[in-house]
Image (spheres, coloured by chain):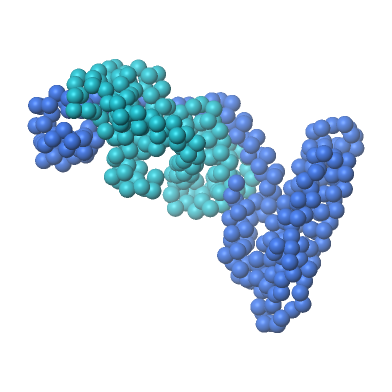
Chain colours: A cyan, B blue
Amino acid sequence: MRTADLELAQRCRQGDAAAFEELYRSHAGRLYNLVYRMAGVQHEAEDLLQEVFLQAHRKLGSFKGESSLGTWLYRLAVNHCLDFLRGRQARMARSSDSLDAEGAREPAAVIPAVPTAISRLDLERAIARLPDGCRAAFILHDVEGFEHNEVAKLLGVSEGTSKSQVHKARMKLRAMLTGAEAAVGAGTRRSAGYTR
Amino acid sequence: MTCQDLELDIGDYVDGTLDAAAVARVEAHVRHCRSCHALVEDVRTLRDATRSLEPQIPPAHLWSRIGAAIEADTRRRPIRRLFSFGAISWQPALSAAALVLVLAGGVWVSWRSVSTGERVTLTPSRNTSDVVAALAPVDEQMQDAEQRYTSVIASLEQIAKTERTTLDTPVAAVVDQNLAVVDQAIGESRDALQKEPSSDLAQQSLFEALRSKVALLQETIALINEMRKGNQDGAARIVSGMNEP
């Protein structure tokens, strides 16, 4: 497998367009799923995937086969998504802050239950609205299925931070899906008067 | 266990990564606390729904767009091919590099031969960014543009030619090979433009090829300079930079 990866990378480096297309066809599906969930918007996901493959094309010289090509590409994509999210987060800082502040100030008294059969569309929309600050950990853990220690490595944070970000994201999703967004502040779930 | 305590453990509990004793504590609390029970159920529902989301599939048109972007990027950065040439590594050339350098910030820099320890004469330096800045008005003055490029290329070629002995033979051969490719592209574009002087495509193609040659020569000169300094880190940075966006 590793040998096949090295050979494919070598052919790509030599300017073999068919080899690069093979690389794309083999890995675009998994990477697109990641960048789509991270970006939350299709056109941004397409831009992100293009940038990931462009960067991969430029950096293939540094691929030494220490991990599989898929893992190497995935890490590249995660890093690219993080840069993207950081940039977007910086641009949206004011509105994100106000969302959190609002949630902290005005906890709702009642949160209805999350419907047991969540519409896929509603869930997709809610995930797309997650704040960038907790999005990456949530996507990697709950969507992509990584363990917290793996998420921590990928994001360069502690395992505890990964857990708290995933928890925060889940609480926000819960609030969004029950129409009780105001109840969810920065990682907290309820007021003393919380009832079902 | 309090509701606050449960909040610390709920993630691990729902994910099934909590140890048995903690699981027992959570379940004991949840049995008597309606809100925590509801919270656990909601998180579990959410988690299951998220895990069962269907994967997003890249649109079919995306490959042609990405392929085109890569091709355009490759044309813009032909030098990358120079350093990714399979059998030829630039590193031996770096270790063989002997002299110190020439070209930084448009100033004159002294160098000395590492091999002889001898101080050598100052050599004229060119700041290639100035050279590129001279190309800025290209879009407004298309008629003069080719002449400008040709003049810039001639200057860069002169520097590269003078200093090329620093390059190891295999690396120099690859440089020549790349220059030949670019020259061929320039020649073909000129032929096309001669046949169809009003063709935007031919015009774009010519300037793209000219830009590629300027970039190739600039990078080659920068590498020569680092090799002359015996600065492997500097040379590595150049190569790394060539691979960066």
Q: Position of residue B73 (x, y in %)?
A: 66, 42
Q: Which quadrant of the view contains residue A15?
A: top right
Q: Position of residue A147 (x, y in %)?
A: 31, 41
Q: Is residue B31 visible?
A: yes
Q: Which quadrant of the view contains residue B86?
A: bottom right
Left or right? Give the position of A146 relative to B28.
right
Left or right? Give the position of B173 relative to B20.
right
- Residue drawn 64% across and 37% down? B69
Q: Is residue A144 visible?
A: no
Tell me if residue B239 comes above or below residue A195 in the rendering: below
Left or right? Give the position of B33 relative to B127.
left
Q: Quadrant of the N terminus of chain B?
A: top left
Q: Nearer the viewer, residue B91 or B232?
A: B232
Q: Position of residue B213 (x, y in %)?
A: 76, 50
- Residue drawn 72% across and 65% down? B103
Q: Nearer the viewer, residue B59 or A116?
A: A116
- Residue drawn 75% across and 55% down? B130
